[in-house]
Image (tube, rainbow, N blue to C red):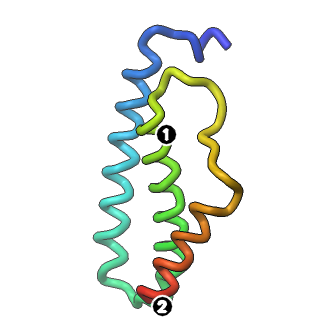
Amino acid sequence: MAALRAPRLPEVCARVAALAHAQFRAARVAMADCDRQAMRPARLMGATYAAILARLERRGWQRLGPARQPAGVAEAVVAVRYGLAA
């Protein structure tokens, strides 16, 4: 709990989020050279985790607890998007 109350936690979280964005970009670049059908699960997983990261960034790093949203909504949106885009 002490770590969650650390005054510089938002700064650390922002740095980790920037690293995550860089890794998501690198993965998209790497997958561009691969078979789209074979990469469908990886694209779906990447899009799901990128959506979670975006929700965390929008709400800010001060609040404790998981980023909540109605169960399955984000996953359904990502699945439809990537299911139709494949």
Q: Which mark is residue 77?
A: none
Which quarter of the picture shows residue 29? Answer: bottom left
Q: Residue furthest front?
A: 70
Looking at the image, is 51 positioned above or below residue 8? below
Residue at the spot 47% in from the left edge and 77% down from the top edge: 81
Q: Quadrant of the N terminus?
A: top right
Q: Which residue is mark 2?
A: 37
At label 1, which amino acid type do we have? Leu
| Left or right of 65 on screen, residue 12 | left
Where residue 39 sits: x, y (%)?
A: 47, 81
Residue at the spot 42% in from the left edge and 22% down from the top edge: 10
Helix, strand or loop at disc 1?
helix
Which quarter of the picture shows residue 33? Answer: bottom left
Report how far apart the C-alphas of labels 1 and 2 lie in the structure. 30 Å
- Reading the chain from its start, which is encountered first: label 1 or label 2? 2
Residue at the spot 52% in from the left edge and 10% down from the top edge: 6
Helix, strand or loop at disc 2?
helix
| Left or right of 79 on screen, residue 59 | left
Q: Which residue is mark 1?
A: 56
Classed neighbour count for the residue bearing mark 2: other residues with Cα under 10 Å, few (<14), some (14–19), many (≥20): few
